[in-house]
Amino acid sequence: MEAYCLKCKQKREIEKPSAEYTSNGIPVTKGLCSVCGSKLSLLGYSTAHDGVPKPDSATASVPQKAISKDPKKRTAATRSGGKKSVKTQNTTTLKEEKPVKSGLSDQKLVIVESPAKAKTVGRFLGRGYAVRASIGHVRDLKKSTLSVSVENNFEPEYRVPNEKRQLVKELTELAKKSKKIYLATDPDREGEAIAWHLLESAAIDPERVDRVVFHEITQPAIKAAFDNPRSIDMNLVDAQQARRILDRLVGYKLSPLLWAKVQGHLSAGRVQSVAVRLIVDREREIENFKPKEYWTITVELQPEGVKGTFFSRLQKINGQDPELGDESIVQTHLENLKKAAFFIQSIKKGTRRRKPSAPFTTSTLQQEASKRLGFTANRTMALAQQLYEGVDIGSEGSTGLITYMRTDSTNISEIAQKDARAFIVNRFGSSFAPGKIPQYKTKSKGAQEAHEAIRPTDVNRTPDRMKEFLGRDQFRLYQLIWQRFLASQMEDAVYDTISIDVAANYQNQYLFRSSGSKLQFQGFLVLYEESQDEDFKFDEMENTKFPEGLFEGQRQKCLQYIPEQHFTQPPARYTEATLVKTLEENGIGRPSTYASILSTIQTRGYVSRESKRLFPTEIGIIVNDLLVKGFSSIVDVKFTSFLEEELDKVAEGEKDWRKVVGEFYSEFEPALNQANAELPKTKPEPEKVGRPCPECGRDLIIRQGRFGKFISCSGFPGCKYTEPIIQNIGIPCPICGKDIVVRRSKNGRIFYGCSAYPECQFVSWKKPVKTRCPECGGLMVEMNKNKIQCANCKHEIENPED
């Protein structure tokens, strides 16, 4: 028995068929697709229905559907210089008739995306305005089909989803009665597309529609936006539309290939596949890395006539970089150095100015929040959205606390700069305000989207003032944004620097060097210092503490020779922060897509996140290798960056979106056909646990899920038995003495608990370490890479296990 599978786009054999009747008494056979596992339904009577009772409501009359069976096509009118918009399918019940202009009320309708934003905007606009939320997009490509007509010049077929039809109907009725309609969606391509879809799906009269754009939700910004409305920018809409169609073509065309060649329930994305490739390539670099031995020689020196000492490291031998590849070479040089006379060859003193970091863009905010606060990109953007859309701050009501959070610009408005300067002078003194207002250049390729960096809407709303109105994580992120912005408008930090070269001559000319610095003027550091990358390694020789009384020519007594063996290290695995940085540097994705890229590759099970590091899963490696083999020019960093630049040209009106999609598809389609014909099947072999399922007796196997590996029955989906993989960290529970193990919460967050749970209730979000507290002997946990803290008395020390 066969039925049409919406995912496979063809008829498939029904697995585990079950004969049933609908509530209206219609016979139906339900089951699963034999290829992808999707649910299948086949209407009609079969012999299996014999003996199956019909429901009592079978004789009841079927209510007439409110949805039109014959939807009409219509063309959206725009005011973009006479440019015609794309014809699209409209499946709502809305009638296509021009609104009657007579009898309009004085009310003005404002449509935004979210209820929180609607509340804040509505408070500023006051009476005479009805502010409603669209709850995101009101129209999209159909989920059940490709919904893009390749033969008809990539014509999209849009539809209002069932869950949005009532909302669209209400907006349509409000628009008919309103004197003016303002589309106040977000100031980027996504927001522009939402505004256009609202205009189209709600049958709004274009003559009464204005588009308003603001980058912060404050009284002055709202007033300025409504005083300067514009029409919908179809160039931005087309850029977003092109991205959506490109992603749909890749996803819907590649997914069936993965089902046929690898396994069901897999999917592929255009940009996400490149992100997975970066992670897989990095993993292979690590696997293939061959460490090389090298040595360093450090000496402890005591200046003649001075009590103190300092350390210096060998930099040159006979003017060349030292090549200390093994211990025998090192020993030869050590013998020479023991006979050499050391003296200070040169002392160089100077000053160094350290400039503050630019105010946040989307990318840098996600990176810093990951490093400093431990937030995922998704968490960061969700909190930033809340701060942007508005928070109730007591007597001031619901107010947006930060500017728009999807931006790659580092620009700051003149008003914000003047306010920041006045705050700095008042709080820290005039010496902390620079003579010239700082200007920053974005490092992002093809910077676009919003016009400003992410900053507080009012610098006088200090984190301390706002703390009582914010949740813990909201406060931490707001404090980070506020500090970074204010620091970016402050004076440079100034250091006194010193670099000392020490010569030692015997058989060879040896040059040792050490340097140090002392903070002379704090500048912006009084408020904020950017976090170091997770892989940053501190060099002690760059921060040497020198004794007083040093001068050139001064002899030095060598107290000890310190040869150290090292091995070169492989490149570090990506964290979310470093992957976002790499994507931005290579021009892959845009501010609105970074978080979704990271979320998608983990949700699909292609990448797992452990201790902040991103690891490719087995299925992720298999899918990546298949795509690279079949689509090497498409799943390519440079090509994806080029395509982003093409979309930027569409947004700027320099290129037609259909041409961009067509050029891509002309290369993609032949590769797809060849891959279907030539690529071999690569089925991943499940790893057996070695014991039977306690519920059905089949073998237990290890599967990979969105939150890592787990144990499951090989009889899935017939048997749904699962259990976690217990990972013992080798540290006893401080309560009962049994093992502490790694566990995961329902949303996948790692925590540490006692293996005797539920009898023992010990849990910790932070990883326990073997070191005991020197104050009370209690269990200590990791606070960050360098610090550990006692879970009992909160005493902190440097991590000796690092």
Image: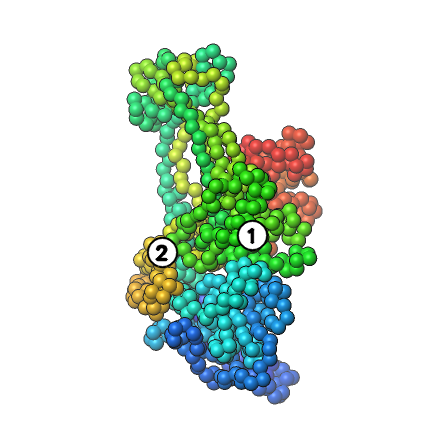
Q: Residue at x 53, y 49 (%)?
A: 418
- Looking at the rendering, which quadrant does residue 379 occupy? bottom right
Task: Identify the residue under disc 2.
Answer: 641
Task: Identify the residue under disc 1.
Answer: 456
Mark 2 vs mark 1: in front: 1
Q: Residue at x 63, y 87 (%)?
A: 60
Q: Nearer the viewer, residue 756 or 516?
A: 516
* Residue 190 visible somewhere in the drawing: yes
Colour treatment of the image: rainbow
| Crowd band around label 2 with a 10 angstrom C-alpha radius: few (<14), some (14–19), many (20+) | many
Amino acid found under the numbered disc labelled 2:
Ser
Q: Position of residue 594 (x, y in %)?
A: 46, 55
Local SS, label 2: helix
Local SS, label 1: loop
Q: Nearer the viewer, residue 384 or 448?
A: 448
Q: Nearer the viewer, residue 339 or 397?
A: 397
Q: Work out whether 760 lies above or below 238.
A: above
